[in-house]
Image (cartoon, grey):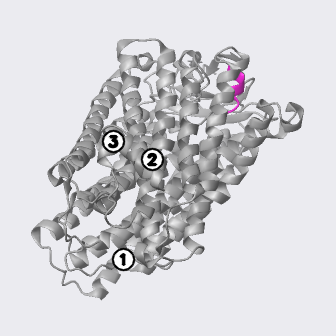
Amino acid sequence: MLDFLYLNGWGAFVMVLLMAVPFAVVFTYVIHKKTVVDQGPAATLPDKISQIEIGWIALVLVVFVGVNLYSISYMPTARTANALASGQDIQQVDLTARSWSYEISNRTVKAGTPVRFSGKSADTMHGFAIYHPDGDVLFTMMLMPGLEGSTSIIHTFDEPGIYTIRCLEYCGLAHHAMRDQLTVVQNDG
Amino acid sequence: MLSATTIIQKIPLFGGMFSVDRSTGLEEINSWPALMILTSFIWLAVAGLLGVAMPLVQLLGINTNLFYMSLTAHGAALAFPFVFQLMIGVGLHRLGSCVGKPITGPIPALIYIFMNLGAALLTVAILMGLNISLVTMFPLPVVGVMTGQWSMNALIIGFSGIALVLITMIVLYPVQVIRMSFFEERREDLLLSERSLKDPGMLGMVLSALVLLVAGIPLLIVASAILGALYGIIPMAAIGWATKPVVFQFVFFIFAHNLMEAMALMVISAVYATLPLYLADGTRKLYSDKLANLALWILLLTSVTSFLHHFITLFPNMPAYMAYHGNIMSFGTGVGAALSIFTILATVWKHGLRMAPGLAAILVGFVLYILDGASAVVTSNVAWAYQLHGTMWQSGHTMTVLVSMSLMWMGVLYHHYPVITGREIDEKLGNLFVKFCSVGVIGAALVMLAGGSAGMPRRFADWGQGGWMGYGNLILIFGLIIGIAYIIYAMSLIKSRNLPAATNY
């Protein structure tokens, strides 16, 4: 369940619905009740409203803290740190983006072994997003020109296949044509 | 001041919707705001046509350059000369009537001229080929000249337009608000509903002006240096610091992010001011002014540094701790929103509500604003940002925040319309507008968020590439519904009727 929530764009969509739908229902109920059903002042005691106020704020804080705490282990930045700390072999892929193509040092990597993607831009802002063969975005990186260091992330592919690379930062009139491929093969070792 | 009234009378169709009532002696708080509001709706018509053009270009398989042209022009027209100008117009009218100060003199005239001339110049540049998207994407404007995508002339005209718009938002408007809030003599004849800075309905307006001034100055300095070099006034070698992409991007987003938050502060403040006027028991008080003010302060303090969430995927060039900080501060703005939700619902629960089209638009706009807030905090989380950044999710967020805020302002305008024009809107059409707008915006927002979840890139001229055309079709349908809603809104003003002679403001 948590894997779906945090590792998939649709998980984010579900999270928005989980936050927004209860709010919309309660909001609509209160407005309907106090404009159509009973327009008069409520008999609710002030103490009761204060209790609801404290309960509501506590609920919001618990949800917000919970959502962010649970997300830590799914953050690509945290996963990168963990991969580095584990001492595992890491496959290296260097890339340079320029309008409207990528120079990629290695277009074939192995599944199950961490891959460090290190990217730079040679001209304007570009993106480097890897799409799973089923169409989901696995991760995206922002490549800003003029920086000394590379933008970098470590990712471990679970499955072999042909993965699509796309630029997700608008970079000019042929932005939509800036794409490439990465082949992930079975790790025989 | 009188010239603004005269200009309004000379504008066909729109002039009739906003002709100022000269019988009340309130022209000094009505004329410039009315002209700004009127002009903002002309820009809305332009933005609406361009918005529909985007999916149409894709569906019909027309030249992709036209898509990027529509995209840039639509965003530029919607964000600045429509939403921001509407906000300035309604906001200044509100401020004038709350503090009893006239909106006259050179600054309101300069606000109007700079905003519209700037937006017009930018539009001309876009038509000349400067297709740089709403957020400029620096150094793309310069790279585009070097790679022959557009001309240097287009770049200079476009940047001149952007500079005029920035001067309006960062200097002229905040100066006018500060001038009216803290200086000048109060005139009792212009005072319609007195408010002090302790009042949430005033606090947000002043805070937003200060945010724009403070957050915008760095961008104004950088943009001035670049423009000075483009004009040949400053040697190019002397502005190397300003043309570094990292410098431009950070000062841009410090401003752009806080611009949205400042607009939120201002509109929530207007909601706090308007809601009590519709309470069924005539109380005219919020559940708690302190809680309402606390929400505004939390929104202000958390939003200032939450702009860092725009750079989460730049790791490790932007260190992880800064990304986490942006993440946490973004959720902090959600705490402010939670307090606003409680204040509004507790007020309504306690005192009952008299529904009117203006209030309905405000409440629906608020619901959309919260829905958008949920999408914003989710995409600010580091884990989700890596899957959603650069997708249609972000476009959905931008569209929803702009439309929800404009919907709230259009509701507030319904409330102030009789004071400005001496006429009352057609209520039936007003209610119909709210219904159509609700369906259109909720539908468009959900489809765009869903498109982003499915990996559909934003600012992307080939939706067929990843099988995203279905989302595009739905965006077009809901976009047309929003367009119909705006036409109904215009009709509700065109069909407005004169107020009874004895109306007391």
Q: Do the numbered discs 2 and 3 sit on residues whose CB atoms are within 8 Å?
A: no
Q: Which residues are magenta?
A: B138-144
Residue B140 on the magenta segment: yes
Are tags 2 and 3 found on a single chain?
yes
Q: Residue type at mark 2?
A: Val
Give the chain letter at badge 3. Answer: B
User: Who's the residue at 42% across and 41% down the image?
Assistant: B399
Q: Is residue B220 above or below residue A154?
A: below
Check disc 3 and report the residue beneath it. B14
Q: Is residue B400 above or below residue B502?
A: above
x and y, in percent, of residue B3 in the image? 47, 50
Check disc 2 and report the residue beneath it. B83
Q: Residues within 10 Å of mark 2 (few under 14, many from 20)?
A: many
User: Who's the residue at 33% across and 51% down the image?
Assistant: B19
SS at badge 3: helix
Residue A119 on the magenta segment: no
